[in-house]
Amino acid sequence: MSNITNINDESILKQIERNLMDFSSDVKVQNVGKVEKNTDGVITSTGLTQAGIGEEVEFENGVMGMILGLDEDYASIIVLGEGNSISEGSTVKRTGRILSINVHDSILGRVINPIGLPLDGKPEIKKGTAMPLEKLAAGVIERESVDTPLKTGIKAIDSMIPIGRGQRELIIGDRGLGKTAIAIDTIINQKHHAKDQKPVICIYVAIGQKQSTVAQVINVLKENDALPYSIVIAASASEPVALQYLAPFAGVAIAEYFCAQGRDVLIVYDDLTKHAWAYRQLSLVLRRPAGREAYPGDIFYLHSRLLERAVKLSKKNGGGSITALPIIETQAGDISAYIPTNVISITDGQIFVESDLFNNGIRPAINAGYSVSRVGGAAQTSAMKSVIGMLRIAQAQYRELAAFAQFGSELDADTRSQLEKGKRTVEVLKQAQYHPLSEPLQIMSIWAVTHGYTDDIPAEDVLRFEHDYIEYLQRKGKKLLDELATGKKPSKETQELMQNVTEDFKKTFSA
Ligand SMILES: Nc1ncnc2c1ncn2[C@@H]1O[C@H](COP(=O)(O)OP(=O)(O)O)[C@@H](O)[C@H]1O
Ligand SMILES: [Mg+2]
């Protein structure tokens, strides 16, 4: 048997395009092949000369598969079921359909695997629309620029690294530093939406994780009333790599179903490092030529065609959006490894979490200096923009001065006060897990600290100050919070109100 040759990117694109055309024109397909080899559930067959990449095929025993690669003589197929049930010499036939997942509105709140089977013990998903796992991303003409914030509820992100709807923002860092926590808090925060709007639909794709970890995430979503507007797609580490490979594509296919209805969708890929492993494993089984770090040469293309499907559709096309939060796990903070650099280059920015910060109790452990959002600023409200200027300056000065001050040199009063202010802004950006904050409350917290209202209290009391302040605002500052919720730049009167409420609160607070 000859090796399956490496398929270049362009040929895959052409194939997919041809498939889509073929299938829509309802051509009669019948093309039967023979299973030559079964290597750990990855099949090599002869005879499927007319098939296309991404096409669904059916084995003799009724088990389904999907064409992963083609060359002149052989097709490689991943099995969508019991891999070892396919015997060599048995037949396999084309279906003429691109592999798709059944999506129905009632899929909200469900937990499924990448081929749409329920994992939550509830009945099958009702028959709805077949959404293709492989699809060409929307073109420029159908798109519109990103202009609406996707609020995470996390102060450090919404203020300094704002994310817009339709954007791809990478969450990157070592294991155990709160990457999943950021994504889950963002999902929980979607519960807080304007009364006249529907919540952003959230899709959490778990790839190659331990089953218990996924179960925990589902529980958290349930406990926080976030499951009704969410969908979880899981292919855990114990599942075949074929399913792990398909999981993100199943996720984005579901996202496209809701996006086509004009809805805003958020999709989390947790994580693409493990997705890359799954693809590498598949490719090794198929003996495709391996490149850097033994990944197949088209791994970059795999992730770019996935992330390209994040979109903000124009009004004419319904105005829906898909915001993607891919997650990448690094080793020892090394973002220059192959997969991290790939994904960094195909996203619109990254949120970088760091062990030094995490271990020093700065959580979320976001390194604001290395993190960036290339489009989100355009989507930030004027209300938020009005407070972040001073925050940015205070943080940047603090980073510089703190390094300098370590040497214990004599500091003048001015420098010392800048350091103290900086220290307090670091404190106010700390945030407990599962406590996303509405934008008006974020604005008030940041405003109070940057405007000196905490200068006279010890830095270690800033979080307690914030906690009590928020409670006070929720009780006595309703009018002010409503005004800030409009997103408009605070007027003179609003600013006066901010001062008055804060001064009143300070009388009740003792450090
Ligand atoms: N903002 C936070 N405050 C306190 N603890 C946090 C915070 N974010 C995450 N953690 C804790 O840190 C640990 C690792 O978080 P997790 O999101 O699972 O990391 P990762 O996905 O990067 O591996 C968990 O125990 C989690 O509860
Ligand atoms: Mg995680």
Image (cartoon, grey):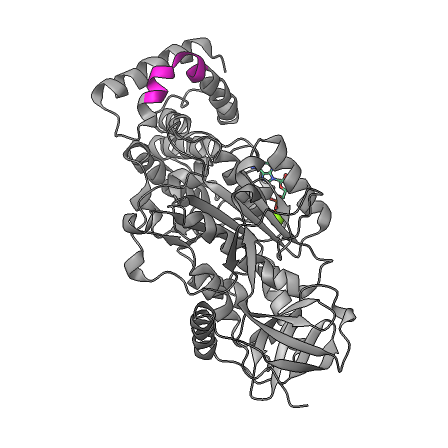
Percent x, y of residue 75: 61, 80
Percent x, y of residue 232: 60, 46
Left or right: residue 36 versus residue 459 is: right
Q: Which residues are magenta?
A: 472-482
Q: Is residue 479 magenta?
A: yes
Q: Is residue 205 above or below residue 28?
A: above
Q: Farthest bottom residue?
A: 2
Percent x, y of residue 332: 60, 58
Q: Is residue 389 above or below residue 491?
A: below
* The quadrant where residue 22 appears: bottom left
Left or right: residue 221 versus residue 393 is: right
Residue 287 appears in the figure: no
Q: Nearer the viewer, residue 207 or 28?
A: 28
Dominant secondary structure, magenta: helix
Q: Is residue 471 above or below residue 345?
A: above
Q: Nearer the viewer, residue 385 or 265?
A: 265
Q: Is residue 232 above or below residue 33?
A: above
Percent x, y of residue 30: 58, 78
* The quadrant where residue 418 appears: top left
Give the residue drawn at x 52%, y 26%.
460
Q: Nearer the viewer, residue 471 or 418?
A: 471
